[in-house]
Each structure stands twice: as structure tokens, then as C-alpha cells.
Amino acid sequence: MQAIEPAIDPALEAQLEASRDQRLESYFELLRIPSISALPEHAADCRRTAEWIAAEASRIGFENVEVTPGVPRPIVYADWLHAPGAPTVIVYCHYDVQPVDPIDLWDTAPFEPFVRDGRVIGRGSADDKGQLHLHLRAAEAFFSTRGRLPLNLKLVFEGEEESSSVFIKDWLPANRERLKADAVVISDTSFFEGNRPALTVGLRGMVYVQIDVTGPALDLHSGGYGGLVENPGNALARIIAELKDRDGVVQIPGFYDDVVPVTPEQHAELEAMPFDDNEILRITGASRLVGEKGYTPLERTGYRPTLDVNGMWGGFTGEGSKTIIPGHAHAKVSCRLVPNQDPGRIFEALRDYVRQVAPPGVSVEVRDLGHGKPLVVGTDDFVAQAALEALEATFGVKPFTQRGGGSIPVAEMFETVLGHAPVMLGFTNADSNAHAPNESMVLSNYETGIRTICRLWENLGGRTA
């Protein structure tokens, strides 16, 4: 949808309007750093991004700015705590980004951002540097016009969200005292389909594994040894085929044991939401929608678990032909989990099932590459209510509440470690191509997102902690 012109404090609006060009160049500067956390060769880029953010936070007016030492993908912490009586809110975003493969499907270099048709194109423009950046710019508007914030803020910007948030799992409990707050706001989610404003009230959990199938000690001539030894490529294909049936039902024993059924009330609520199959087909380029039989698309993405192959490799894949039996084959597989499913238990069930269905003649290893728990939150919290009010006031329409299909590992940690269910207030357009080529952020979402955050901080600043 098209954002309306927000009626925030005229001084804030004047500052934001005057700094529009400078703000966009700063946004581009952040996007140009290739902070890919999954690739070790980009560890220095992750630290460089953290230091860039820390320098900006200090320049704007935040205090106690820290880039955690001794880790390749550090956490940036900063705070401003001079609003006595007002609430204290933690803001979480992440600065690391996904790998850019397949590079040939990008219209331009992934880390050379530009504006096209009202969108900022570039890796991280939406997920999640764009949302991190708009928080900095909202804070800057307050510091520039008033010299202060209307509430107390603590920034926690992570560099491993795309790699299972490994370091922060220990960092959060170790910093529990420093992170005392009244609420947590996460900006790493999107609007509803059609770019309709929405507050996310649920996230799926995750189990991510690598399956390694090993056969002969080295690649063999397929003419001399075909039919004599098991082919790891064939074996892997058989394993993958056994994971789901033709109706999209995962075949791992016990996989659905703890899944909470969709209630009639939830089904009716989802049916009333304006989901458009054709819009999803347009965005994805797919020929048809598929999924677990007996469930609607919104039920499948928010209320049901999944299993997907994320990549497969092994043997010869170059130009021309090379007739071999490969010595090994591999696959990366992810499961999105819903409430009550335990990632550790699902990993063990998946590992045991893969071993069970693997044909004789190969050895199989299933490695846990990371996992996170699912989360569902309510909207009764005063910050959630204020966020819904800010969205409606800024965009001019009543926002949806939605369960997201993705995962944010740290979201559940904030609840268990700090005792606050996070308010997941994101601004990304649903067709952002996050994790894919030509990732984009609708520029009006970014700009109006800044105004929404300004309105939210103003609103909360008038309340008693």
C-alpha cells in the first residue's frame, strides 16, 4: 500500500525531510559492506560493519557504545538512559546478511545498492540492514531536534542472525543485568502480502542440518564399477525422496506429535485475511502453489511445520560429461517448526530416520548446523498496543496481526532470558526477495517506518515505566 504523509512533530519531520539525501547515502554506505556471516572469508567485513554502526551510534548521541571484542561477528551494544520515569526499551536488529548465490540472477552487483521504481535494491536492503538503519535515523531525528530521546533505549545489533545466533546465546545471559528493560522491540519482520502494515505475533522455529553420504574412497569409473557399488548421489536422492510424500506430509516418525492443531477460530480469522494466490505466484514466479494437503496457504506458512532441501551437491557438475560414481554427496535441509515442537527432539528424529532409510553400501552423517525455538506472543502488552497504534496512525489503515513463516533465533531467547516477549515490529515489503537475488526495500516503507518509530518512541515516552 502507499504510505500517507505522517503527521509527527513538525520539527522531527523537518529534520527528516532536510536529511533525506544524506540519509539515503548513509543507507547505501552500510549496504556496501558485504557482511555475510555464513562465509568465514567475510568475518572481517562483519566486524567492519559492526564498527560502522558503533561509530554512527556514537555520532548520533548514544552512550556506552561497545563492539564485543574477540569475536569475528560481534554484537553492537549502545544505550541512552536519561529519561527518568519513562520506559526502557531494547531494540534488536541484525547487520549480517545472506550469501548472494546465485550471483548470475542479480541485475547488478549485490553490494552496489541503487534505487529503481521506488525500491532500494541490494543485499541487506530489507533483511535487516534497512530496518536497523531506520532505527538509527529515527533516533538521530530526536537527538538533532531535542538533544534527547523521549524514552530510554538500549540497542542490541547482532552479526550472526543468519547463522543461528550462536554467540548471542551466551552473551544474553552474561549481560542480563545490563539488559534490564521494560520491553523488547525486534525489527526483522515484514508487512502482510500486498504491502499492508502488520505486526508479527508468531515465528516458526528452525532445525538446520547437513546430510553427508559417503561411499567409495574416491570417485570411480561408472562403466567399471556401476552396478557393483552404491552410488552416494543415488543414495542421497533416495533419502531425500523418503523425507516427504506427494501430499507434502513429512514422513519422519513423530514429526507432528507436538503440533498444535489449527482451531476453527484461527481458520476463520485466516480466511478473512486478503491473501491472493495470484500475487504470490507473481512474486515467486512459480507456476502453482503447493504444500501440505488439507491446509490453506496461510495455515501452512504460520501454523504448520515444514521440511525443505536448501541445497544438494556431489560428483561432477561442470561443462560436458564425466562418467563417474562420486565418492560422496551432500544436502542441506531445514525444518521450520511451530509451537510445542522441540528443535532438539526434531533433530534426533530426523537424524535417526535418515539413517534408517539410507541404503546399504554408504555411510551417512547428519550434522546439526543450528536451531531455534518457535515463538507466539500476544498483543496485550503496552508496547504492542502502542506499536499497533503507531502503525495505524502513520499508515492510515488498521494493521493486521500475523504469524510469520520465518525464524529469528534470538526472539525466543529474549523471552526466556530477559522475561519479555518481544514486540515484532517490522517494515519490510512482503515481496522483498529476502535471501534471494535482487533483494529490495520499498523506499516509502523505509521512510514511513522511520516516522512510525518516531511516533512509537514519542507515545511510549509519555508513559510511566
Image: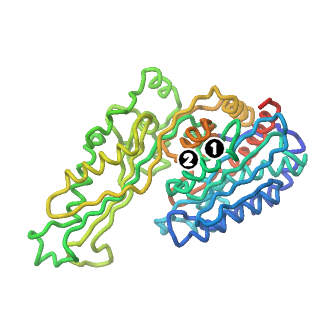
Q: Are marks 1 and 2 in contact (CB under 8 Å)?
A: yes
Q: Which residue shows up at 26% across the image and 49% down it?
A: 352
> Mark 1 to mark 2: distance in Å?
10 Å
Q: Is residue 237 left or right of residue 392?
A: left
Q: Label 1, secondary structure: give it.
A: strand
* Amino acid type of the residue tagged 1 in the rendering: Ile
- In this view, the residue in front, 379 or 365, is 365
- Residue 186 disc label: 1
Q: Quadrant of the N terminus?
A: top right
Residue 241, compared with residue 379, is above or below; it is below
Would you say 111 lies left or right of 19 here?
Answer: left
Residue at 18 percent of width and 67 percent of height? 231
- Quarter occupied by residue 228: bottom left
Report the mark closest to the observer, 1 or 2.
2
Which numbered circle lies on residue 424? Answer: none
Residue at 53%, 32% in the rendered image: 274
Check residue 410 in the rendering and tell me which mark sits there, or answer none.
2
Q: Percent position (x, y) of residue 358?
A: 20, 56
Crowding at dot 1, Cα within 10 Å, few <14 / some 14-19 / many 20+, comes out as many
Q: What residue sits 28% from the left and 66% below the top?
A: 329
Question: 307 left or right of 132?
Answer: left
Q: How is the image coloured?
A: rainbow
Q: Quadrant of residue 419?
A: top right
Q: Residue furthest left?
A: 228
